[in-house]
């Protein structure tokens, strides 16, 4: 295993094709799934020479939580689908690598147990964030927030791009409409009397509004990030509503198909928030060079979704740890090659659009995308 692609290939060889499709798939024609990765390929790095340092600092502090690398584990549901220990394996690997994990509300292990496993490896400094789908029944939402808070989670990541569940036609074709026997969304177990944590307890709510965000802001003192805001006007509204951070995400192309790649939106989103709150970008991050491009264009960190699922499927905890170590090393190597000593050295002038400088295109304008 040398890179993320190797984990994908290995996972495909071991996984039930129905679950491999669930992970890889996206909405409808999967135009946005492909766009996310293509956007990274469409940019070139233009490195600086003779100004690096012997050691590079990759640590990042986000909303008070420190991580050893600016690569977060984006929230992904159902880890027991691909490895017996499920999210316990993921959390242990993330803690060992000093990476920040965002626990999915739809985890197949309860968030409290995930937090215990992470702390057993990484001690009390380990930070976990909790991803939340606000439920129309606010008492249920409050109970979920309480479970995350009691587990010691230090931020809430509220996913707002899912007023309805994305239409994944691979899942429909494969007849995937339930979890296998014995797997449950453990965070939803017994929220009401006798409920088992069935996946259908999770309500996707088209009626959610900014008033729900205001309500959540009053309900919890944890920092709140919104995941899935794509319009710069919504980013401005998020700041006005007291939101503490954004996860610039199109859900890995799994919600509305044909929305832009997250990387394409980043410059406009960064301008809209103007440094007032941090932006974490996810979607299509597969290489250290991808991380550098996102940070150069204004992200404070990135998230990875599918790569973690592939590594889990390939070899569980040790493979997720290996994946994170590989990405850490790739990022360090990329910084060195760019002449950067740390993440603060990653600025927009390191990035050019592919095709820039082609004879006759007249695009040689000092690095401004034309
Ligand atoms: C299998 C799978 C499950 C996911 N589950 C969730 C989830 O429960 N909540 C959520 O907000 N996003 C979920 N996502 C979206 C990820 O958080 C993330 O936005 C996306 O995977 C990033 O793109 P990437 O897979 O290209 O890295 C899921 C994505 C995948 C692939
Ligand atoms: O969010 C997702 O992408 C996802 O796969 C999912 C599906 C149902 C419940 C929770 C997450």
Image (cartoon, grey):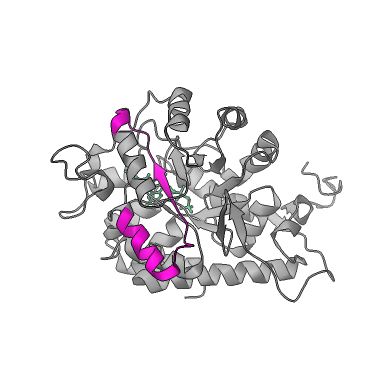
Residue drawn at point x = 73 percent, y = 57 percent = 344
Q: Which residue is drawn at 83% across and 69% down?
A: 51
Q: In this view, does 287 lie above or below 240?
A: below
x, y (%) of residue 178?
21, 46
Q: Which of 80 and 252 is in front in this view?
A: 80
Is 41 magenta? The answer is no
The x and y percentages for residue 187 are: 28, 47
Identify which residue, 46 or 49, lies in the foreground: 49
Tell whether position 129 is magenta.
Answer: yes
Q: Work out which quarter of the rendered image holds the C terminus and state it.
A: top right
Which one is nearer the viewer's eye here, 204 or 53?
Answer: 53
Residue farthest along the left direction in this orientation: 194
Boundaries of the magenta span: 112-139
Q: In the displayed structure, does residue 362 sit left or right of residue 263?
A: right
On screen, residue 116 versus residue 270, left or right, reads left
Quarter for ligand 2?
Answer: top left
Q: Specify whether residue 105 is in view.
A: no
- Residue for point 15% across, 38% down: 193
Q: Where does residue 100 sit, x and y in percent of width and height?
A: 49, 58
Q: Is residue 80 left or right of residue 308?
A: left
Say which quarter of the image contains residue 10. bottom left
Q: Can residue 225 be seen in this view?
A: yes
Q: Which residue is drawn at 58% across and 63% down?
A: 69
Relative to 113, is 133 above or below?
Answer: above
């Amino acid at each position: 295993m040398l890179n993320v692609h190797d984990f994908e290939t290995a996972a495909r060889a071991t996984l039930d094709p129905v679950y491999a499709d669930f992970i890889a798939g996206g909405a409808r024609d999967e135009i946005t799934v492909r766009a996310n990765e293509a956007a990274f390929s469409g940019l070139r790095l233009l490195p600086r020479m003779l100004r690096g340092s012997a050691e590079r600092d990759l640590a990042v502090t986000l909303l008070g939580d420190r991580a050893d690398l600016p690569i977060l584990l984006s929230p992904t549901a159902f880890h027991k689908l691909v490895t017996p220990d499920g999210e316990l394996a993921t959390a242990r690997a993330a803690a060992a690598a000093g990476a920040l994990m965002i626990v999915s509300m739809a985890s197949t292990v309860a968030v409290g147990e995930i937090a215990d496993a992470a702390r057993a490896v990484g001690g009390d400094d380990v930070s976990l964030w909790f991803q939340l789908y606000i439920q129309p029944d606010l008492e249920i939402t409050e109970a979920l927030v309480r479970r995350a808070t009691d587990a010691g989670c230090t931020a809430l990541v509220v996913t707002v791009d899912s007023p309805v569940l994305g239409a994944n036609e691979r899942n429909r074709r494969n007849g995937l409409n339930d979890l296998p026997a014995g797997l449950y969304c453990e965070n939803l177990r017994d929220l009401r009397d006798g409920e088992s944590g069935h996946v259908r307890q999770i309500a996707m709510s088209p009626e959610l509004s900014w008033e729900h965000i205001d309500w959540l802001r009053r309900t919890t003192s944890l920092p709140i990030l919104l995941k899935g805001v794509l319009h710069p006007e919504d980013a401005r509204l998020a700041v006005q509503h007291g939101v503490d951070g954004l996860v610039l995400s199109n859900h890995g192309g799994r919600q509305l198909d044909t929305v832009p790649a997250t990387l394409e939106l980043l410059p406009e989103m960064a301008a809209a928030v103007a440094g007032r709150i941090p932006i974490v970008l996810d979607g299509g991050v597969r290489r250290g060079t991808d991380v550098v491009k996102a940070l150069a264009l204004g992200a404070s960190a990135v998230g990875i979704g599918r790569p973690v699922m592939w590594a889990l499927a390939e070899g569980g905890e040790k493979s997720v740890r290996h994946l994170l170590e590989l990405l850490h090393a790739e990022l360090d190597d990329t910084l060195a090659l760019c002449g950067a000593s740390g993440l603060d050295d990653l600025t927009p002038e390191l990035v050019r659009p592919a095709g820039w400088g082609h004879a006759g295109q007249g695009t040689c304008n000092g690095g401004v995308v034309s």
